[in-house]
Amino acid sequence: MPSSISQTFETLRDRAQCALIPFLTAGDPDLETTAEALRLLDQQGADMIELGVPYSDPLADGPVIQAAATRALAKGTTLDQVLAMVTQVAPTLRSPIILFTYYNPILNRGIEQFLQNLVAAGVKGLVVPDLPLEEADILLKPAEKAGIEVILLVAPTSPAERILAIAAKSQGFIYLVSTTGVTGVRDTMEDRVKVLIEQLRQVTDKPIGVGFGISQPEHARQVMEWGADGTIVGSAFVKRLSEGSPKEGLKALSEFCHTLKVAITPVS
Amino acid sequence: MTTTPIKLSNPTAIENRPDALGRYGQFGGKYVPETLMPALFELEAAYQEYRKDPTFQAELNGLLKDYVGRPSPLYFAERLTEHYARPDGSGPQIYLKREDLNHTGAHKINNALAQALMAKRMGKKRVIAETGAGQHGVATATVCARFGLECIIYMGVHDMERQSLNVFRMRLMGAEVRGVSSGTGTLKDATSEAIRDWVTNVETTHYILGSVAGPHPYPMIVRDFHAIIGVEARQQCLEKWGGLPDILIACVGGGSNAMGLFHEFINEKSIRIIGVEAAGHGVETDKHAATLTKGRVGVLHGAMSYLLQDEQGQVIEPHSISAGLDYPGVGPEHSYLMDVGRAEYYAVTDQQALDAFQQLSQLEGIIPALETSHAIAYLATLCPQLPGSPRIVLNCSGRGDKDVLTVSKVLNI
């Protein structure tokens, strides 16, 4: 049974390891493939896995994840189906599952009910990209009670006093958005990520996970060397899984995960 | 009417709406990615500064007068009034607030102009906007040309087809029109794409949101920049009959022209306030855009409001013949006004709007926008219910030149 997000980071910190956190859109191409992908990622070195619930209006996502969500919804993928799949798969994984969902589906279900469903499914963490600090209180308190860690995001545009407040309230880790923009594959890592990591480090002991735009092993290694505790890779996985047949997609995903893991494993 | 000094809004009518967190009751707020939060604070601070700045106000008022052509007339629609008169000659007296006579042909320029002035002062040289019918896109392209700002308009590919005249106008004025093909290729999808652009380019770009929707402070800013519609109407009613109107009517998609007319009169409890939504093929079908009539509370494009959504909380693709009303959300203040019982909202179908489009053309020689036609169409339901001769002010929010191709296709003329 996987441990909490915080505990997982603690264990990794003791081993001086940077967490590899792959992201997948649930239900693309189908939930069976998503389940298999979760197992493969877990075997190939993922330390936590972020699982995106497909949504009709994914404001924070770039073309790759938008398209994946559209395909998943066209297949009729629902939150209940995603959670049913997680209920089956989560106990067999080392990696805790972090659910990524926009706020409207949470509001639609009701916060309490939603959290209970997450707990029952074995989900450990939650990222809600359109719920900034000012609106997050309504979710943070009941989530803490339920034992679901809500991870808040810091952006390159966040001023110092906001960074401090977000760092104080974020649970599990702090999700540092590496670039102004939506999710998606990018060629380079901006140097200001280094500054942001240093800035965050000064105000918090909580782990820092860097995401958005990390698509190559060099990027992952770069953010690790800059002092990140975790690296989140999304579109690059989603894209690989969606190309060719599910079997080919799973193979490409598995190899890519291994490559990333090697890139961020300290040479001993 | 005499040219009275134009104020952004009547301070006595504002109350505490929205509150400091941008809430209208439970509605509104800021549900956006963290990257945008600092920009929203910056925008709010800039707005609070400029609204009190006499130089800003003077520049805005000068342009509203000389460039936009304000004040827009309050016109007594004599033959439309006759059409609804009872045999004894009594019946509602119908006045049209002629926002269709503004430069660019709709109310949208009021807000686009004021926001462009803000962008200029905030040092943002790149402007983006979403558009449905193209009226807000045209207004934004217009003011960007006027101030030499780079302009990018996001528009659904379906809307680009049905509002091709407006696409040409925007391009003619130097704007880049980017087609959005996700979803149904309509206003919702264009808005999502504009927000994604803003998240990416927030440090150099101002987003001129075109409705009283989106995250705080947009619903407040857009409302206040359109509030001049109601402020003028109050003055014009006073001049024409020495009193207030009895009923206000406006169409509601996101709801900017409606809030522009309503805001000034919210505290005048004697006045009935009516918003008219798009029922598309009918509110009993799954092809409509009647958010307040059929929606449930949800979050879209940064605001909590009524929303057309399925049982899973996925946003439903709306339908309306009018591209400007083809939106599954609605401005948060409208949700609030409905819930507290201050305003009433009804829906009329595509067909009723088409009938009204022709009716106003034939009775008054005014071709209304298809959006506006929804408000006009509701008169057919409302007028027979009204005793005596109440005075109705209907916001004639836009002209219908842009819609003639769509309508001629449907009517085969």
Image: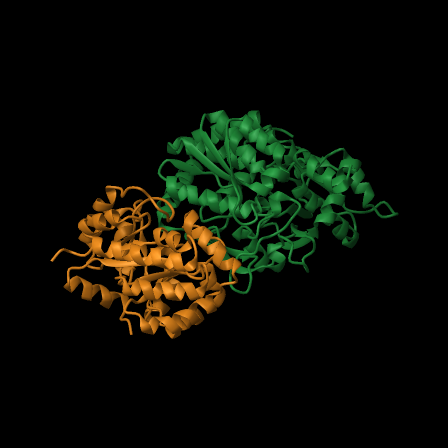
Chain colours: A orange, B green
- Can see residue A79? yes
Q: Quadrant of the C terminus of chain B?
A: top right
Residue A68: x and y in percent read 45, 54
Residue for point 40% across, 41% down: B43
Above or below — where is B389 with respect to B77? Answer: below
Q: Position of residue A57 (x, y in %)?
A: 48, 53
Asked if residue B124 lies left or right of residue B256, the reply is: left
The residue under the point 58% across, 47% down is B255
| Residue A158 location (% of width, % of height) | 30, 47
Please say whether residue B132 is visible from this viewpoint.
no
Q: How many numbered circles does the render carry? A: 0
Residue B209 image point, x, y percent: 49, 41
The answer to whether B222 appears left or right of B292 in the picture is: left
Is residue A91 positioned above or below B115 on the image? below
Query: Front-most of A53 and B326?
Result: A53
Quadrant placement of the N terminus of chain B: top right
Q: Is residue B172 left or right of residue B38?
A: right
Judge by depth and name the residue closer to the eye, B23 or B388: B23
**Viewer-closest of B82 and B129:** B129
**Within the image, what quadrant is residue B104 found in?**
top right
**Residue placed furthest toward the right:** B87
Which sits in the foreground, B269 or A106? A106
